[in-house]
Amino acid sequence: MRKGKDYTYFDLRQEWETIELKYGFTDDDMFYLFNEPFLDEGVNEGKIFVFSHVPTLEVFKDDAIRKEWNYLKDNYGFEFLKNEGEFWYAK
């Protein structure tokens, strides 16, 4: 988890692949172990979820960004994405 002045975001960058290889995890394992707890914590703290890209685009169909959006919808009732400038807000 990384924090800025007014935001928190999840990004393992190159560490993602290193962890997968070291422990034999799949992408699904990684999502369950890292992304889901981060999303749960954010929801429980009342955070606003902002995407830098539209997670519903076909190009992201197999990516974590799509899985994150689906997780928020399926587990917390988020229903749509609102475009505000260059960002997409989960509502």
Image (tube, rainbow, N blue to C red):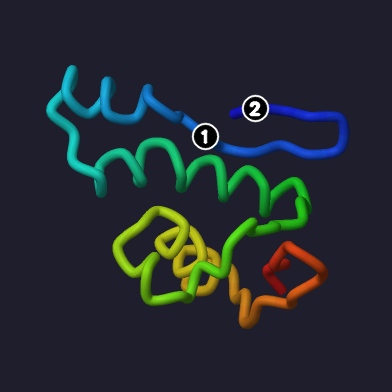
Q: Position of residue 91 (x, y in %)?
A: 71, 74
Indicate whether 11 appears above or below 46.
above
Q: Position of residue 31 (x, y in %)?
A: 36, 45
Indicate whether 63 appears above or below 90.
above
Residue at the extreme bottom of the image, as rendered: 79
Q: Residue at x 81, y 71 (%)?
A: 84
The answer to the question of whether label 1 and label 2 lie on touching residues, with beta carbons closer than 8 A, is yes
Q: Residue at x 13, y 28 (%)?
A: 24
The residue tagged 2 is 2
In this rendering, the count of numbered labels is 2
Residue at the extreme top of the image, as rendered: 22
Residue neighbourhood size for the residue with mark 1, other residues' Cα within 10 Å, grouped as few (<14), some (14–19), many (≥20): few
Q: Residue at x 65, y 27 (%)?
A: 2
Q: Residue at x 69, y 67 (%)?
A: 88
Q: Position of residue 45 (x, y in %)?
A: 75, 46
The residue tagged 1 is 11
Q: CA distance from mark 1 to mark 2?
A: 7 Å
Nearest the eye: 45 or 29: 29
Q: Earlier in the sequence, mark 1 or mark 2?
A: 2
